[in-house]
Amino acid sequence: MPDVLWEPPADVLERSRIGDYLRWLRAHRGLEFTDYAELWQWSVTDLSAFWGSVWDYFQVIAHTPATDVLADATMPGARWFPGATLNYAEHVLRMPGLADDDPVVIAHGQTRAPQTLTAADLREQVRRVAAGLRRLGVGTGDRVAAYAPNIPETFVLMLATTSLGAVFSSCAPEFGTRSVTDRWQQIEPTVLVAVDGYRYGDKPVDRRGEVAAIRAALPSLRHTVAVPYLDPAGVPPEGAIGWAELAVETDEPLTFTPVPFDHPLYVLYSSGTTGLPKPIVHGHGGILLEHLKMLALHHDLGAGDRFFWFTTTGWMMWNFLVSGPAVGAAIVLFDGNPGHPDLGTVWRLAEETGMTYLGTSPPFLLACRKAGLVPKEIADLSALRGLGSTGAPLPPEGFTWVYEAVGETLQLQSLSGGTDVCTGFVGGVPLLPVHAGEIACRALGTKVEARSADGTPVIGELGELVITAPMPSMPVGFWNDPDGRRYREAYFDFYPGVWRHGDWITVNSRGGCVITGRSDATLNRGGVRLGTAEFYSVVEGLDEVVDSVVVHLEDADGGPGELLLFVVLGEGLELDDTLRKKIARELRTALSPRHVPDEIHQVRAVPRTLSAKKLEVPVKKILTGTPVDSAAAKGALANPESLTAFAAFAQRRASDEDATVG
């Protein structure tokens, strides 16, 4: 299979939104760029000119004008568009290119029948809910919290909240009580909107007990609004009102409160796998500009598109997805189990909804590949132009499978970024080809570099992912961090004035990028730094292995340390010496002798966050003696019970017994 899997069509500049933007730059700024590399270089060198052009090109509505683009470029603390006032919700509801009766929200799930909202429906629902929130006393700066899934009500609530200048925060209803209260006790919401439960596949999940516990744990709450989702005939709990009462008919007009560029829009949270989750505050202006740039210029989305990402409301990709209407794209929402009744669910949904861009994650794509699924044989995917993958590195075989099994003409865009900026630092662009196993480019306006151990930028070798110039969507700060200390420590302590993200990245000579896992989960063998992504690609490529986690335990005396591999095997399989040898042989052949583990053990499950990220660091902490409760915040895990096997293993190791994991 060739390295280049997709090439831009000859007429890409005529057909793409980035082509239109390049023509606009020539006409309005007198700027000519011969290729993407030149455009990127300008965008990260002249930040004011680039972000000023994004503002003008997308015709951002300013209620009062900015006195400057970038008044201070210091990190942290960069000051963007001082003096400007605007409102994020106003831009999402502008829906450029869509008529009143065009669909803009297409919602499917496993709890109720599909729903479609037109542009007019969406504006009307936001108008009513904003009026309802106003009646509940919600104003600028108040916090509104949603314990609700990826359904239209959550989207409407977010827009209604932010239209008032109030601050939104969501948790997916699969989050446990502790996980939710750890987040919301920090921001003290005055209004809670919560569902009664949901269906996951064919299984009903009642959340009324969790909602009661969350209400009891939040003394700041003045009002609770119940969404009868699992049981449409259900009545609100005592002291709460129903969604219908919040969204009752009113003649109040839809208005947008103008707020400063960096006024809090919503609060997102870091994975929260250790300690309290970090409450990351994003601003109206920064998120708006970043999402306009990314959705239109990188993902090539506009009027006529149907944009989907498989996500819950507890992951930043939901916030990214629901900005789609700001560039004219309709959004497809899905709430439920993507594997029910089988892995074809999402692909059939793509056909049914006319999806033009389908976003998902490497574990899903690799699970489809492993199951032998050929999506193009079970669904008509002819409308699909783009396929996005994020949340973990996608290995080369994942790329190859997409082009063999999904479609030859779509553009596969692997991207990587973070909750911290609510976007991708690196991703795809219509102007560049797709190489197997490689992220095509560094995003416009995002000055990504790889840094070696001594802090110098490197090309073509593994380094620490850093951002050396400010981005508008960097956090406004952390909630309740008045002197900015926690924010500084999180990103700027390692290299003063430079954002260190915590990923290993290789940037090659053509600007392509390969991310090889979290730098804090690094395997360092004999001085050679190994990322975990390539390790998993080999181990999980074996038919017998369903999942795996690898950790490196350092030797305090400077020795080679120990590399421990834990595998989840297929139904009914037991790990024996034959399989251990096979795994070791595969790793030695595919990677290097340094990658061969010192020990391989079988576990029932790999601990993962609610957004499906593997938790290497907490496993490592447990194996080095940290108590389970200190190593990870259990409420943030999809399967907290998986940690007990590692704790038992650590105890047995400590007492020098022959260690096996159950």
Image: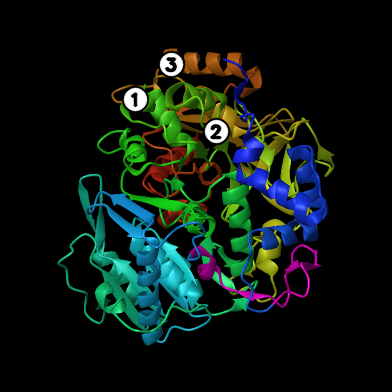
Q: Which mark is residue 343?
A: none
x and y percentages locating residue 423 in the rendered image: 59, 52
Q: Amino acid type of disc 2?
A: Gln
Residues rendered magenta in the picture: 65-92
Q: Does 581 sit left or right of 9 as displayed? A: left
Residue matched to label 3: 579
Q: Secondary structure at mark 1?
A: loop
Nearest-to-viewer mark from 1 and 3: 1
Q: Earlier in the sequence, mark 1 or mark 2?
A: 2
x and y percentages locating residue 46 in the rendered image: 82, 55
Q: What residue appears at the point 28 percent right and 50 percent down from the top-left corner?
A: 109
Work out how far the residue at label 2 is from the one at label 3, CA to CA, in angstroms. 38 Å
Nearest-to-viewer mark from 2 and 3: 2
Q: Secondary structure at mark 2?
A: strand
Q: Quadrant of the N terminus?
A: top right
Q: Which mark is residue 411?
A: 2
Q: Which mark is residue 570?
A: 1
Q: Amino acid type of disc 1?
A: Gly
